[in-house]
Amino acid sequence: MSGYPSSRGERVVIVGASLTGLHAADALRDGGFTGHITLVGAEPHPPYDRPPLSKRVLAGRMSADSTGLPQRQDLDAHWRLGNAAVALDRDARTVTLEDGTTLGFDKLLIATGTRARRWPDPDEAALTGVLSIRTREDAVELQARLAARPGRVLVIGAGFVGSEVASVCRELGLDVTVVERSAAPLAGALGAWAGTAAGRLQRRHGVDLRTDTSVVELEGDADGRLRRARLSDGAVLDVDVAVVALGAVRNVEWLAGSGLTVDSRGVRCDPYCRAVDADGRPCDDILAAGDVACWPHPLYEGLLAVEHWDNAVRQARVAATTILHGPVREHTALPTFWSNQFGLNIKVVGVPGRADQVAVLQGSVERAAFVAAYGRGGRVIGALAVNTPRALDAYAEMISRRMSFPPDLNAADAPDPVHVLDLAVPAAG
């Protein structure tokens, strides 16, 4: 079938009943789609908000039951929750679910997102006290264990989730050790310069931060409870809880044999969210959006794969437009994300992790209120705002206009002089 569904009787299946799936369904109804919508979710819950799980829920200031996402209209959708998709047959236009049910579709949106990367040793991962945080159940269990006042919490990985968990531990007065194999926390997303500053902040807040180090073994007692962790530098830590924060894995295994272009970055799609097949051709009837998608962005080399709230919402609405009207609207929004940790509000626009230079253009790092711009190849590609979130709109404009780096702002609070620091040049893809 070709063309774009708009009348009753057409079937849209959305695999992934979380933030992306909900907003896609909402946008379809807003756009006048009157056909059948089915939302398939691996989890038993209706769509809920994940960012609070590693912040307010973990700190006990919000219940996991309160994280449900609002539905601003009756979607008149059929929900298949707690029933994951296990296979896609493009020729038959069907999705097979875990319980053996087969769903036919005219249009399919893949929005299966990601899951937390597990500890690689299955026996060690099964120890009581070894946890990750991605789902509501994860947050409830970890919050209960933190409330029980463990002797020491080990956080494995110092990205944003790991750093947020460490921040909550210190807020609760718990001893916490963070082990990070790179030279600094948050370095992958913000570069070594910002990561070094983040490391100093964590240590000032009492975090036992071990960088350039990895966990080589988790040990349990005879009852299968976590008791110790052995590190690559020979140190042995007594720990009661270990939070594995080693990033995310995209949920694409169910697409094996589908003929789509899929790898560790997710489902490749074009700027209109149409999934790309193995021959490099976009599929009019299969789309991808949210954390599971990777796509070309006009401002960046290679493909972007973004795991953030704002991108999930914006990309879902582009996908809905393509379902309704075809390839008329590209997904060109800049990546934007935020974090609260150790008393700081951190907000980012663009892709700082690909920069080769950085400069603080406003405020003061020492006072923990500043804006830094990131450049690559002589143009602005990203910005970081710490405790100054309103400043980022201007920097987003600079990125979109491909302004030269460093931009000349003549800001009243600009350092004098502005220092440009060189960074290690990461790969573009």
Image (tube, rainbow, N blue to C red):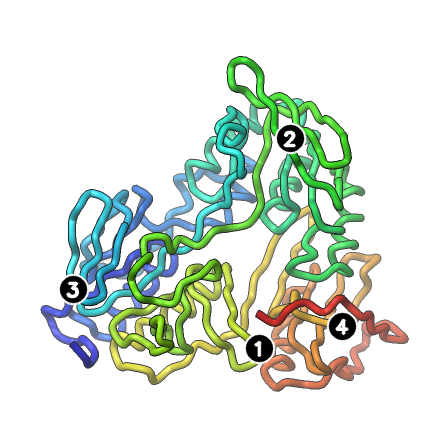
Binning the other alpha carbons within 10 Å of mark 1 as few (below 14), some (14 to 19) or many (20 upward) gives some
Which residue is situated farthest in the left direction here? Answer: 9
Q: Please tell me whether mark 3 or mark 4 is closer to you in this view.
A: 3
Q: Amino acid at mark 4?
A: Gln
Residue kind at label 2, given as amino acid type: Val
Q: Nearer the viewer, mark 1 or mark 2?
A: 1
- Identified by mark 3, the residue type is Ala
Label drawn at residue 357? 4
Identify the element where label 2 is drawn: strand
Task: Name the residue: 19% across, 67% down.
Answer: 91
Disc number for residue 153: 2
Tag 1 secondary structure: loop
Residue 70 as seen in the image, left or right of residue 169: left
Distance of mark 2 from mark 3, alpha carbons? 50 Å
Residue at the limit of the structure toward the top, as seen here: 222
Q: Are marks 1 and 2 in contact (CB under 8 Å)?
A: no
Name the residue that disc number 1 marks. 300
Secondary element at tag 3: loop
Q: Label 1 to label 4, Cα distance in Å?
A: 16 Å
